[in-house]
Image: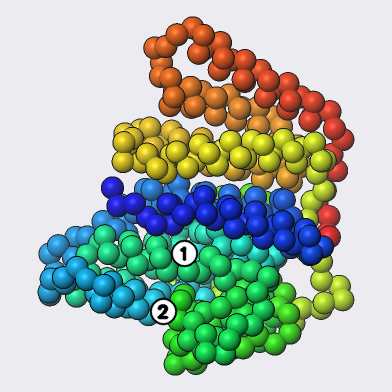
Amino acid sequence: MILDPTVIAIPVYFLLIGIELIVHRVQAVKSYRLNDAITNINCGVTSQVTGAFLKVLSIGVYTIIFENFRIMDLPNSAIIWISAFIAYDFFYYWAHRMSHQVNLFWGGHSVHHQSEEYNLSVALRQSSTQTIWTFAFYIPMALVGVHPILLVSVSGFNLLYQFWIHTESINKLPKWFEAVFNTPSHHRVHHARNPKYIDKNHAGTFIVWDKLFGTFKAEEERPIYGITKNLNSWNPVWANMAHYSDMWLDIKSIPKLGDKIRYVFEKPGWLPNYMGGYRAPQEVNTDTYKKFNTNTAAKLNIYVLVQYILLLAGTSMFLFNLDKMHATDKLIFAGVIIFSVVSFGALFENRSWALVMESFRLIFIISAAFYAFVGINTEPLMIILAAALLIVFQIWLMLVRKVPLPVKAQLE
């Protein structure tokens, strides 16, 4: 198994998120909302889980090309690693830039931009489909002999670098650093939905790519974060499907086959001239703009938070033990995890069916945990303990169910 550095760093991610949260509480800065932060991390969980299967495509194709078509063998050295890191960041810039310029690719990348907040949890909001559209950008590295293990290493550290720049806690850094590297200030611009900021600062680590290729924009006024058409949902699966759904509706409405095909590869917002042409992003009215939010009872929030912590522990164990699991087991546990994050989103949205879904989730999650830790043939005491845990959670859920919940989402 090629272990991704981003998986190893999971505990550090949550430690830094906790520190930022505490600092902001002390400073009376409201940058975190429980529903938004959990949804951000849920998207990351979903991405990691689906990535366990999609890496067969991305790393698999890369490895085949490396093994059969590379033109040289590169030695293991610090210089080669640094060169590969710089090369990866160059190709990342173009993959990232095209993810904003091509409608189909934006369907994958848009997930990362959906949050209307900007904090370290947003860094974990990753897409489950983006790798399908962007893995081919790195094929030149396979051709020149960059080993797949080296690719995973540099790509992981590139993503690790980008974690810390998702914050408003850091203002401007020294000019020499801002001139060369991507920084929180530069990346805040990239996450903005203000028209003058859109499609700027695509860099991963080195901002010099944006300056060389004409996509750099310095931060001026404080950005408004999110995408031009808000997701208005806490469901991580829908977060991954929303843009594709919009594309399907547009494609059905376009009468000409040639324009249907062109639409897929044009810039997001494009329509044929006879249908009104390009739908440009609109300026945000800061006086009337409100963030999407839903009110949920405090007891329900506590319940979700506790269940979520347990799920994160289980997900971490899943990711760290992938190489020891059979394909069927991977599918079972991946399904339980994704079912769980959808259930949490439904609870935050006060869906009428959310509590029923959560009841079934508890049965599935306890059964999966029982299967994973103690197996089918075990002592009766373990069966009793598992049943007791399920009963406790079900009683807790019943108590939560009695709390009156608002039905509709409201704007904050």
- Type of amino acid at the residue the image marks with label 1: Leu
- Type of amino acid at the residue the image marks with label 2: Trp
Q: Residue at x 14, y 62 (%)?
A: 67
Per the image, the residue denoted by label 2 is 94
Per the image, the residue denoted by label 1 is 160
Q: Residue at x 71, y 32 (%)?
A: 355
**Res 217 quadrant in image:** bottom right
**Residue 245 in view in this figure:** no
Q: Secondary structure at mark 2?
A: helix
Q: Residue at x 79, y 51 (%)?
A: 294
Residue 317 appears left or right of 79: right
Q: Classify 10 Å Cα crowding around label 1: few (below 14), some (14-19), many (20 and above).
A: some
The location of residue 330, given as percent across then percent down, is 39, 37
- Which quadrant would the C terminus be assigned to in this image? bottom right
For marks 1 and 2, the one nearer the N-term is 2
Specify the farthest residue to the top.
380
**Relative to the observer, which residue lies in front, 352 or 330?**
330
The location of residue 36, given as percent across then percent down, is 69, 55
**Residue 19 in view in this figure:** yes
Give the Cα separation between the discs numbered 1 and 2: 19 Å
